[in-house]
Image (cartoon, rainbow, N blue to C red):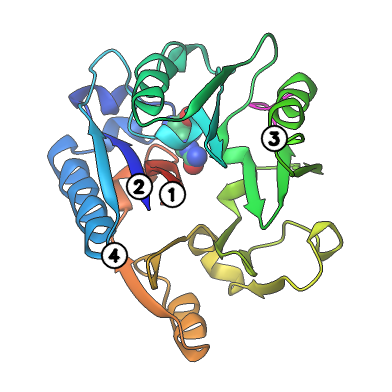
Amino acid sequence: MRALVRGVPDSIVAATAAEGTAAAIEPDRARAQHRAYVRALRAEGVEVIALPADERFPDGCFVEDTAVVARGHALVTPSANPQRAGEEGAVAEALAGAGLVVHRMADGVLDGGDVLRVGERFLVGRTARTDAAGARALARVFGPLGFEVVEVAVHSGLHLKCVCSAPRPELVLRAGLPPAAVLPAGVECLDVPADEAYAANAVGVGGAILVAAGHPGTAAALRGRGDRVVELDNGELRKADGSLTCLSILFP
Ligand code: CIR
């Protein structure tokens, strides 16, 4: 497995944050948390491709939003957030350098944080960041590669994956969404405790699941099922509405 990540700039204090909390970020602490995330990926055998921080992009470390990757192809996705315009340039170059076929969108917007891959299906959240044209672009690129694209209405929050993830292909961790009806047969849902919605965003790598620290119910539920859980403090990046999946683009 490989992971593309991007460093945390000092300008992260100007990152977009719904609650206006980014200004309270301590960049050095955020960088330390980001380094711990990268160390955890490496510890699970992931080869990390690290782009340097770019001060022009306060939200740049949240690389997940800039591309969707599967089966050797990458769809590079422009953001509806004007402050994030241009982030995708260096990401596209790096993905092409890693040997992926890179596709661009002719129109529309999409954030990777709205795209949940579950097996051969992409669930795409319709949010302020992802429109119908974005969802169509996803289907255009990944349909011929064997994927089905299913839209999911998201009525609150930034992205679909703020409340769910698929840390293993047959396991969806969720806090409300997605509805079970949109999941492929054989996929199991694990609902996180009501007061641990943030922990529904977890990363499966190697033999482990990376979970945001401070969510003991979620960690215990996963451990109880036999999963190895690595807890990571993501508190500074969370102040900019970041979660764990958003810090990397994972591909074989
Ligand atoms: C933004 O508003 O775009 C960033 N501050 C946070 C992006 C988080 N992305 C993600 O969870 N996929």
The answer to whether 173 is drawn above or below residue 9 in the figure is: below
Distance from the alpha carbon under mark 4 to that under mark 2: 11 Å
Q: CA distance from mark 3 to mark 4?
A: 28 Å
Please tell me whether the stretch drawn in magenta is mainly helix, strand or loop: loop
Q: Which mark is residue 44?
A: 4
Residue on which the image places disc 3: 142
Q: Answer with mark 4 or mark 2, whichever residue precedes in sequence.
A: 2
Q: Amino acid at mark 1?
A: Pro
Q: Is residue 129 magenta?
A: yes
Give yes or no for contact between labels 1 and 2 (Cβ–Cβ under 8 Å): yes
Residue marked by disc 2: 2
What stretch of residues is rendered in magenta? 127-131
In terms of sequence position, does the residue under pointer 1 or pointer 4 come before the other?
4
Vertical arrangement, residue 115 with respect to residue 223, above or below = above
Q: Where does the image place residue 15, in percent across and percent down from the top left?
A: 36, 26
Mark 1 or mark 2, which has the lower sequence index? Answer: 2
Amino acid type indicated by mark 4: Glu
Q: Which mark is residue 157?
A: none
Marks 1 and 3, the one that precedes in the sequence? 3
